[in-house]
Amino acid sequence: MYLARVTSTAQQDDQIAAPPGVLSLTGHPVRWQLLSELARSDRQVRELTALVGLRQSLTSYHLGQLRDAGLVTMRRSSADGRDTYYSLDLAACRDGLAEAGTALHPGLRLVPAPLAEPAAGGGRRKPRQPRVRVLFLCTGNSARSQMAEAILEQLGGPRIEAASAGSHPKPLHRDAVRAMRERGIDIAGRRSKHLSEFTDQRFDHVISLCDRVREKCPDFPGPPTVAHWSIPDPAAAATADEHSYQAFVRTADELDTRIHFLLHAIERAPARSEGTQ
């Protein structure tokens, strides 16, 4: 009787026995390596080809598989239209892997670990940790990097020190100010800064947001962890689209998502000594 019930259950489950597609897709060694590299930084296809050690055609095939699944996006470089940058959609990966756990058992649904909150006045405090310094770079320091600096300041709390600069500074774009004000952050009084103001300073993370700046980014002492987020200049849309303000809103949304994931990485990184700051 028991064996009959077991057999019947197995037969019923045959139609759902295949693992979720995200597992077979990401479980391939090459695609997992590509995802791992893109989790650290946006990359050009030629860089990914060198990192995985395959022909470009084969690397592009695997990237195409990841793109079709919505885990990876691509866009033409603003520095050289012949180059293509690939980016990992971290939110899509999180959601896909979470649902894969649920498919096996409801209790296995993956959820993002909460960021550590500062201890309340009377609560137990964690051992003192050095501040984490993050520098965002773009061309004009008029939109993307200023917005990223402000968002990280808001989300990161007192342990995070954020800064921003540009290779060719120009005044803050009014739509950047407006988009941030609608998020409850006022950046109107901030000034644009040249990256030369920071080249002798130590940072834990240096993140370029502009394809042009990435190719000209100087070396910083430390050295810091360097990453590139290939984010289009929202001001470029202002010259061609009467609804260009929405480009600034989209940029703020993307920065907010990426910075939330950055904070998870910072929170779980090995602590650095004060001497390395």
Image: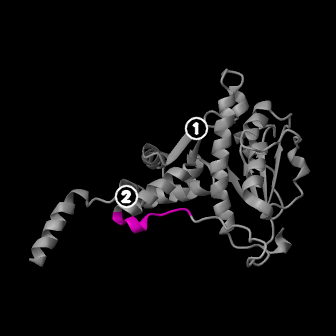
The type of residue carrying mark 1 is Arg
Which quadrant of the rendered structure holds the N terminus? bottom left
Provide the secondary structure element on which disc 2 rests: helix
x then y, percent, for residue 88: 55, 50
Query: Which residues fall within the magenta stretch?
Result: 104-112
The image's colouring method is one colour
x then y, percent, for residue 203: 81, 60
Question: Does residue 150 appear to the left or right of 6 in the view shown?
Answer: right
Using the rendered view, name the quadrant where residue 28 is placed. Answer: bottom left
Provide the secondary structure element on which disc 1 rests: strand
x then y, percent, for residue 50: 57, 54
Name which residue lies at 78% across and 45% down.
185
Which quadrant of the rendered structure holds the C terminus? bottom right
Residue receiving disc 2: 24
Question: Does residue 202 appear to the left or right of 90 in the view shown?
Answer: right
Question: Does residue 259 appear to the left or right of 11 in the view shown?
Answer: right
In-front residue for pair 197/77: 197
Is disc 2 in contact with disc 1, using a CB cutoff of under 8 Å?
no
- Residue 110 counted in the magenta span: yes
Using the rendered view, name the quadrant where residue 100 is placed. Answer: bottom left
| Rendered view: 207 above or below 232 | below
x then y, percent, for residue 154: 75, 53
